[in-house]
Amino acid sequence: MLGSIVIIASTFVPRMGGDHGDKARVIQTMLFMAAINTLLQTILGTRLPTVMTASFAFTLPVLSIINDYSDRTFRSEHERFEVTMRTIQGSLIVSSFVNIFIGFSKAWGNFTRFFSPIVIVPVVCVVGLGLFARGFPLLGNCVEIGLPMLILLVISQQYLKRVFPRAHNILERFALLLCIGLIWAFAAILTESGAYNNAKEQTKQSCRTDRTFLISSAPWVRIPYPFQWGKPIFRASHVFGMMGAALVTSAESTGTYFAAARLAGATPPPASVISHSIGLQGVGMLLEGIFGAAVGTTASVENVGLLGLTHIGSRRVVQISTAFMFFFSIFGKFGAFFASIPLPIFAAIYCVLFGIVAAVGITFIQFANNNSLRNIYVLGLSLFLGISIPQYFISNTTPNGVGPVRTDGIWFDDIVNTIFSSSPTVAIIVGTLLDNTLDAKYSADDRGLAWWRPFQSRKGDSRNEEFYSLPVRIREYIPSRYL
């Protein structure tokens, strides 16, 4: 998860005018809020073993805010950074009520009732495949580190456990950590030996272990606190773009939750569970706005892939892991040490984890008729457009975050460009529309609805209570209409 947070902070903070110390504090804040949101979701939300992390869906709205202040005069770059962060804070606070409303009003849950296995297949697939740019393209920035990491991970985690059956459990669960340590040490040796002294600047940034400057600039002890950057700034033009990103995170998290349930051996989450988890995600976004995070959160795709890699689907394990998140976010030097891992190492891990999530989506086809040409048409078009349309929007977006839709209303541009830059969102729109309008009434059996419908209600399947019921003492204080 640190990989995504470091990428986001490294992308935004320098453009805001922040220095290395500001970047370290932003990383600490996002990690701190990820821990809080993970606890919220595993205790009160879906109850699935999912980790919440910073979302890339907020890229365009945040860049829009940065561009708005780029041509203004400030007394210092640090002041520009703080004003930008305060504007992001205000936008997150207001846009959080979109998720709170669609979640706790059950609007999102009612929308998911239109899903079927035919819709879930492309949605979950593109949750993984849509992130391909963070895989080998990022690994390729430093092949001598990223490629050995990928090869070593596959060999140690898959092949060695079959060669040495007695070490099966150890290799299955700890091979990833072992590989990270070995390749990280290899990268440090290359750095200290001067292998990159005459390399290009981009190569140095990707390969060297000392280019993040986080360890030297991070404070030893610092607890993120509310309104740490100052009073939030509320501007309507920026709020609307954030609202579009809030909707996108709802779609992305929904696909991730279905993947997590499949890998953890749980039944597909009922509509009511999905709905109040999205509402809680809005509460988490509200807290992020208050504490001053750079972006909102979404369910972590890479950690769902980790469920399939390690075969550990314990909710308790994820809850315990939040203790490490709190530790690294408060004791900044320790967190900065691990955040200095070169990004191509993370990219090699993503190649495996995102691939697992994409493959999980394909498994849902077994519950529908995969010989039906109607289903093949819906699947093919949803999957292709779910990758192709976002790729068009991303490839035609300028480095300053100006997308292909350009009208006189920047707020409208931000909403449309953000929504259609998200693969899961596009797949949900196309798949749901086609599956419910194309000969839907006469294809219920082919669509797998006989298998699917019992899971849509909390009481539709006896196993739903086992996986998704809230802790007993908490349920006593929550009105039944919200359960």
Image (cartoon, rainbow, N blue to C red):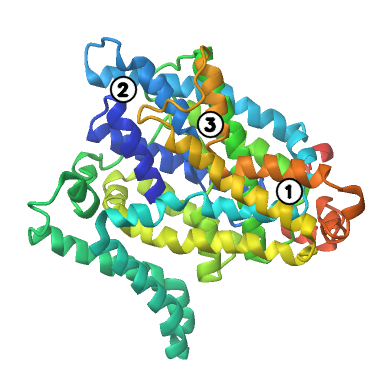
Disc 1 to disc 3, C-alpha distance: 40 Å
Provide the secondary structure element on which disc 3 rests: helix
Q: Amino acid at mark 2?
A: Phe
Q: Amino acid at mark 1?
A: Arg
Query: Which numbered disc flags the more N-terminal residue, 1 or 3?
Result: 3
Dot 2, how many residues are within 10 Å of its Cα: few (below 14), some (14-19), or many (20+)? Answer: many
The residue furthest right is 442
Instruction: State whether residue 172 is above or below residue 370.
Output: below
Residue 455 image point, x, y percent: 81, 56
Disc 3 to disc 2, C-alpha distance: 23 Å
In this view of the protein, which residue sits in the foreground, 86 or 131? 131
Residue 39 image point, x, y percent: 56, 47
The structure residue drawn at horizontal position 20% and vertical position 62%, both measured from the top left corner, is: 187
Query: Which numbered disc flags the more N-terminal residue, 3 or 2?
Result: 2
Provide the secondary structure element on which disc 2 rests: helix
Tell me if 413 is positioned left or right of 258 in this view.
left
The structure residue drawn at horizontal position 58% and vertical position 28%, both measured from the top left corner, is: 244
Residues at marks 2 and 1 touching, judged by CB atoms closer than 8 Å: no
Residue identified by numbered label 3:
418
Residue identified by numbered label 1:
473
Locate the C terminus and report the quarter of the image it occupies. top right
Of marks 3 and 2, the one in the foreground: 3
Of marks 2 and 1, the one in the foreground: 2
In this view of the protein, which residue sits in the foreground, 268 or 79? 268
Q: Which mark is residue 81?
A: 2
Tell me if 14 is positioned left or right of 373 in this view.
left
Q: Is residue 54 visible?
A: yes
